[in-house]
Image (tube, rainbow, N blue to C red):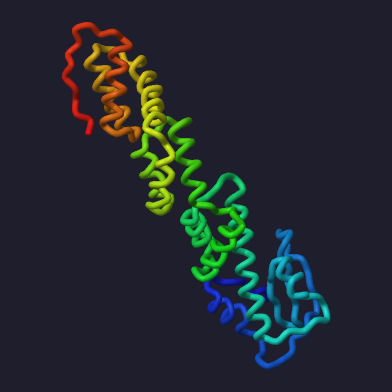
Amino acid sequence: MVIQLNPEPEDQEVQALADFPEGELLEITKVERQKKSDHRYIIHFGAYNLTVHEDVMIKYRMISGNSFMKEDLEEIVVADERQRAYVEGLRYLERKPRTAQEMARRLREKEIGETIITEVLQRLQQERFIDDPLYAKQWAEQRITNQRKGKLWIRQELREKGIDKSLIAEALENISPEEELESALQTGRKKWNMIRGDKNDKRRKTGAFLMRRGFPGEVVRQVLNTLREEENAEGYDDEFYDYE
């Protein structure tokens, strides 16, 4: 029987080692690679079996002939779950950076216990694999420059990703008013030129479009003024919609 691991360390020790005898020295009789897994091994203690990650096996010298008490194996079970969570975390980071909240959510989906999640998050942060301040800064820069989104939109996105409010504020402070205005102007000009209709239609639809993209009312008004001037709309009604 191969015993699998459960989320919480306490549960792991109880269930994974429930059948192991107390107060006996348990000798490893065989070590074999688990099928369909390059990094997990089945450790045999006679009639008892336990699966561990290769790194854990090496760290604790789990080779044939070595012996362990049940309490030793309890420590190993927790170390194995911690290693499993860490490997899963690195795998989740392969495609793109993640926030701490995104990583925690992912590990919960993999049925990792909260205690282990906390430990793994701390390790990933110490190793700079997870860096929420840097993530927020780069995300804000990318969204304002490449995606042409406004600060209001960026703020909401970062909130949904679990970034702390203070870090969001710092990231948005790095975006100057001129940068946001230029981003809004470029995307607004493109929208304006695509609209077929009179100037009022263009103004209304472009303004609504910019608001949906998270640009504040004052920025929207400045953009619409510029676009109107560019089109040299002589005699155009100077009345403005309130986009606040």
231 relative to 15, above or below: above
- Asked which quadrant contains residue 24, the reply is bottom right
Q: Residue furthest bottom?
A: 23
Q: Looking at the picture, how far across and down is residue 185, in whole percent? A: 37, 23
The quadrant the C terminus occupies is top left
- Asked which quadrant contains residue 38, the reply is bottom right
- Asked which quadrant contains residue 73, the reply is bottom right
Residue found 42% across the figure and 46% down from its top: 170
Q: Looking at the picture, how far across and down is residue 80, in whole percent? A: 65, 70
Q: Nearer the viewer, residue 179 or 78?
A: 179
Q: Is residue 66 left or right of residue 189?
A: right
204 relative to 168, above or below: above
The quadrant the N terminus occupies is bottom right
Residue found 82% across the figure and 77% down from its top: 64
Q: Is residue 67 left or right of residue 226?
A: right
212 relative to 3, above or below: above
Residue found 36% across the figure and 38% down from its top: 151
